[in-house]
Each structure stands twice: as structure tokens, then as C-alpha cells.
Image (spheres, rainbow, N blue to C red):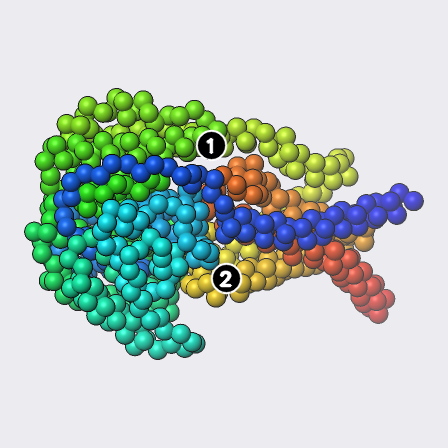
Amino acid sequence: MARVGKILLLVLVLLILAAVGYQAQNLAVMGWDSVVEYQTPYLTDLPRGSAAEPLARRVVLVLVDGLRLDASQKMPRLNELRQRGADLSVRVGQPSLSYPSWTVIVSGVWQEISGVTTNWYEGEVRVDTIFKAARDAGMPAVVVGGGGWDKLYGSHLTEFIEVPWPEGENIPLEAWAQMDGDSYRLAVRVLDDYPEGLILVYFGGTDELAHLYGGVSSQYLDEVQRVDGYIGLLAERLDPEKDVLMVTADHGHVDAGGHGGWERSVLHVPLVMVGKAIRHGVYTERLQADIAPTIAALLGIPIPVHAQGRPLVEMLEASAEAKGRIGLNAGLQLVGFYDAYAQALGVRPFAGDVLTRYRERLARGEEGAVSGMWEEITARAQAARAKRFWRERLLRLPIALGIALVPLLYLLLFRRRLRQLLIPLGFALLYFVFYNALFFGRGYHWSLSAFNSEAQIKAFFNERLLDAALSFVVAGLLLAFVSWKRPLLQILERMTTFAFFVFYLLLLQVDLFYWLYNIRFSWALPDLKLGFKYYMDLLQMVPTGLLGVILAPLGVLIGWGLQRWRIKKVAQD
């Protein structure tokens, strides 16, 4: 009777693993959707700040999609501009995708605040932008680019000039080169029509060729050189005594062509500024969110109200009085936004007293005052965000501990023979060796850059399900063959315990992420590197949970078959 009871208990454990594995798929979808459909709580209506006198009549922002920093350093015409102006790199936010990064560039707002987290974002952005600030100040705000720019910022612009995007499958390389050529030709017309204001010129062929052929391919680099020639020609049409030319990228690419993750070649992109009021020099890295406030300072218009970056006043040639006004405007804008941020976060305002301490230094246009104030306010914002995370982690701790400890009740079956656990535990660890060898051996990382295009996402995740299933079956079958001489009930125990340990070790990793960030993200984005791993762990739980129900009895069947074969062979001998 005890033997039957133990068998039923082991079967129950396998069924529980299968049920939880099935639910893991729903949790994975929930986590993915929570990032894709993230609803920011921070975009309250805020009053726009003051303007200052313009330092330039026109800013032309050239955005080369997917331009890697190292590739930009091999562009002769851009290097000539570097020698005449400000040369630096900027750090991109996460996720490092086009729509999110475009929004950072034109608003100064990171993805967690803007709510633009993927290229599937629907509708116009809700954040204030440099386009809208220019338009409201009576200036032209014009974009030359693909339809995505109109989709995201259409009502913010005074004019949108669409560059036709190649459509269909198997688009030839020449079509992307033609698109960038069209961007140049339309940009020339716009420069002739608009001698002042803000003009953004977008080159998208580089990004598409990096996706198709890779971020170090000759096709990509050739297109980079073609766009470099266009940039040089555009620069020749500008008056350095009146205009500013800025050249940057939304993100870079890994060598294989993807982006979206944390790799250095993705997160660090060029920013070159040349022309009126730009101080020549090579500067250390700044942030992508600093671009919009700097454009506002150059055009003498208010900084976008939700901006988290700062004007790069140290790179501007202006009087101390002018820099003082820029600095004070930046301080007031940051305080206005972060007071609203603190309210949404549920903490006390933390920015006002920082501005009070820096006000005199800002008004004098003192070097370092703007950066010092910004660093203090940003550090306080990060501390407030971290404090809320830890408060919520404390509340989740009992549940997380329960998830981690309750499954260990299964091990009470072995309380008098714990050494019996070592062999199934060893083969469970072998599963992770197999799975990670397949994953990292293909050059993957816990990164959205693993996808070279959005069309590959589903196939990528399906491959990870197959990898997990294959690794689980191989490790389990090896255990079955090692254990075949054991009594059949012992084989069933080993196979069930193997499935338990694989599932439990995955569960611990999922549980850790749950404790750190929850399974839904309503007010903050998680660390997306850990988030990617969390998604991979949940996907592994699906086949490992479901296959345990099949693999455990299969192991018993293998043991029974081999035992019968041995008995028959001994009898024959």
C-alpha cells in the first residue's frame, strides 16, 4: 500500500510540474506584454518654461539610423566636421530600439517616462518634444523621413516631408540606397525653403542594411560612406555663422545586425555638432537625453517640459549672461518635471532645494553649474526610484520566500536518504550545461539584440523552447540509462526528482526576478537584461514542466526493458 501511495505522490508531483509549466507560458506572455504595452504614469500636463535669446537661427539635426560609433569614425566628411566642432558620443537608453530612441532624441525623455518602449508603439507620443516647442514658438519644425516620424510626431510638426519606404519582400540593396538618396534630395529642398527653425533629416537605409547583412558588413559600411557624402553636401549648404548642424544616431548594431540590448556597439553612438555657437573640442560621453535640451538652448526656445536631460552649455559659445538664462531655465524645467515625478512616485519633492542652492551659480553662467545641479537632481530621482523598489520588494518577500521554500516539501520523501538526491541533482545541472551551451554557443546573450529583425522574434523563442526540450530529454534519458539497474520505483523517484530539480532551479531564478521587479510593470521598467533572462527562464519551464510527465514513465519503461533484456540474456547464456 505504501508503494502505491508513493507512486501516486510522484505522479502528483509530475502533474503539478506540468500544470505550473503550462502557466509559465502565460506568465511569459504577461511579462512581454507588460513591457510592450507599458503605460507610463508620469506624463502630466506641465507649464512650459521661459525662452532665452537664440544662439543660432537654424538647427539641422541629421539622424543616421543604426550608425555605430566605430563606423562613424571612418566617415571622412563627418570627421572633417568633428575637427571643426564638438565631437562626443552619447549613451542610448533601454530598450535601444528606433521609436524609443527617436523619442529620447526629440524630447529628452527616457523610455520609462515617455512610455515609448518598442517599435510597436501606437499613436502619437504623449511627451512634449522639441518639435512642438519650436512650433509653439512660431518656428518651422520640419522632418524629412519615413512615415514613422509622422505617426509619432505629426501634430508636433509644421511640415512633414515623407521619404518613400521600399515595400514588399526581397527588397534589393539598391532600393535602400535610393531611399537615402531621396532623403538627401528632399532635404536640399527643405533647406532652401526654411532658412530658420528646426529641421530633422533622417537616413534609414543604413539601419536596414545592417539588419540584412550585419553591422560590420561591406553593404552596411558602403551605405554609411554614401550617407557620409550626403552629410558633407548638406553641411556645405549651411552658414556656420548662423546655422548649427548636428549628426547623431538612434542606436548602433551588434556585428550580426541586431540591436535593442545592452552591447557597447549598440548603446554608444556619435554626436557631432558644428556651426554657430558650438565650442570646438573632444568631449567625454554624454546622454542621448541631452540632445533636445541642447537644441532648445541653441534655438532659444523652452526645453520640452518632460525632459530629463540637460543643455550641454559647456559646448556652447555664449556670454555668461546667456548661459545663466539657459541654466536657470533648465533648472526650473527639471524642478517642474521632477516635482510631478515625485508625486506620481509617491515620495516627497526632492528637486526644489537643489535648484535653490545652485540658483546663484546658474545665474552667473558658472561653468559646471548646470551639470552639477542636474547630477544632484538625477541622483535623488534614482534614489527615490530605488527606495520605492525596495519598499515593494519588502512587501513581496513573504510570497517570494513561499515560492522558494514550499516546493522543498517534496524533498521530505528523501529525509532519511539525502544522498539519493545527488545523482538526479547532477543530471539536472547537466540540463543547464546542455541548454546554455546551445544558447551561448550560438553567440546569443540575454539581450534584445539577439533578434536581427522583428520577423525573427517568434522563431527565436520557438527555438529556445526546442533547445530546452532537447536538453531536458537528453539529460533525462542519460539518467534513465545510468539508473536502469535500479528497482523500477527507484527509477521513477530519480526521474521525478530530476524533473523537480530542473524545474525548481528555474523557478528560483524566476522567483528572484519576481521579488526584484514583479511580473507586471506599472510604474517602472525592469532591468531589461535580467528581464530577458526572466523570459528565457519562463520559456524553459514550459517544456521541462510538461515533458516530465512523459519522460519519467519513459525512464521506467527503459529500465524495465533493459532489465528484461538482461534477464533474457542471462537465461540464454
Query: Viewer-proximal residue, 205 or 571?
Result: 205
Residue type of the residue flagged with mark 1 = Leu
Quadrant the N terminus occupies: top right
- Inspect this view and state whether residue 358 appears: yes
| Residue under the point 72% across and 43% down | 420
Image disc number at residue 380: none
Toward which corner of the image does residue 365 lie, by quadrant? top left
The image position of residue 140, as x and y in percent, is 23, 54
Image disc number at residue 345: 1
User: Badge 1: how crowded within 10 Å, few (<14), some, or many (20+)?
Assistant: some
Q: Residue furthest right?
A: 1
Looking at the image, is 291 positioned above or below residue 202?
above
Q: Specify whether 545 is left or right of 515.
A: right
Query: Viewer-proximal residue, 74 or 329?
Result: 329
Q: Specify whether 573 is left or right of 529.
A: right
The image position of residue 346, as x and y in percent, is 48, 29
User: Badge 2: how crowded within 10 Å, few (<14), some, or many (20+)?
Assistant: some
Residue type of the residue flagged with mark 2 = Ile
Quadrant the C terminus occupies: bottom right
Query: Viewer-proximal residue, 498 or 158?
Result: 158
- Helix, strand or loop at disc 2? helix
- Inspect this view and state whether residue 98 appears: no
Query: Viewer-proximal residue, 351 or 378?
Result: 351
| Residue under the point 22% across and 51% down | 139
Toward which corner of the image does residue 168 lie, by quadrant? bottom left
The image position of residue 137, as x and y in percent, is 24, 46
Q: Specify whether 279 is left or right of 412.
A: left
Looking at the image, is 478 positioned above or below residue 134?
below
Disc 1 to disc 2, C-alpha distance? 33 Å
| Residue under the point 37% across and 69% down | 212
Task: Kindly report which numbered mark, 1 or 2, lies closer to the viewer in this rendering.
Answer: 1
Report which residue position mark 2 lands on.
457
